[in-house]
Image (tube, helix red, strand yellow):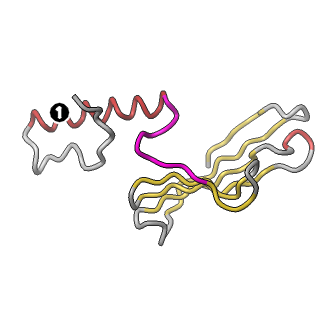
């Protein structure tokens, strides 16, 4: 049996019988479990753009014509120096021609550089 990657087209109540529909749910739930546990989505590639290797301006995850982008802001003073302080996420389903906002993840640090809070907005 091959590994059942997450398939956004399944389950499909129009084209699948009840057994296929249930299998689609089961396989996608297992794939989502694996994505959460691994911290990566099999089949998606990762790249960076602009900035430096240590502090890239953008992070990209891509699979076919789908993209997720994080526009990154890095701290430059005190405990946040060199740490990611904000990531603004967006999704594209047309190869990056248009972007749909997903939200912003903001991270704060104490003077020692320890994370003190992280907020999704």
Q: Position of residue 57 (x, y in %)?
A: 70, 58
Q: Name the residue: 15% across, 38% down.
A: 21
Q: Name the residue: 41% across, 67% down.
A: 94
Position of 25 with respect to 65 (left or right) is left
Q: Is residue 57 above or below residue 79?
A: below
**Front position in the image: 89 or 69:** 69
Q: Name the residue: 62% across, 49% down.
A: 121
Residue identified by numbered label 1? 22
Q: Position of residue 67 (x, y in %)?
A: 47, 57
Q: Position of residue 89 (x, y in %)?
A: 58, 54
Name the quadrant containing residue 119: top right
Locate the N terminus and report the quarter of the image it occupies: top left
- Label tally: 1
Position of 19 with respect to 94 (left or right) is left
The reply to whether the magenta stretch includes residue 44 is: yes
Segment tinted magenta in the rendering: 38-47
Q: Residues within 10 Å of mark 1 (few under 14, many from 20)?
A: some
Considering every residue shown, the one lying at the far left of the view is 17
**Front position in the image: 50 or 69:** 50
Q: Is residue 63 above or below residue 2?
A: below
Position of 42 with respect to 103 (left or right) is left
Q: Secondary structure at mark 1?
A: helix
Magenta stretch, overall SS: loop
Q: Name the residue: 12% across, 37% down.
A: 20
The reply to whether the magenta stretch includes residue 65 is: no
Q: Position of residue 66 (x, y in %)?
A: 42, 58
């Amino acid at each position: 049996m091959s590994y059942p990657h997450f398939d956004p087209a399944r389950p499909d109540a129009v084209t699948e019988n009840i057994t296929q529909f249930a299998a689609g749910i089961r396989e996608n739930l297992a794939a989502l479990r694996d994505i959460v546990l691994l911290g990566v989505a099999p089949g998606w590639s990762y790249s960076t753009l602009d900035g430096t290797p240590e502090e890239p301006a953008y992070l990209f995850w891509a699979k076919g014509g789908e993209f997720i982008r994080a526009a990154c802001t890095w701290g430059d003073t005190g405990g946040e120096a060199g740490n990611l302080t904000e990531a603004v996420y967006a999704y594209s389903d047309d190869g990056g021609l248009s972007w749909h906002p997903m939200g912003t993840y903001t991270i704060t640090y104490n003077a020692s550089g320890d994370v003190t809070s992280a907020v999704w907005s």
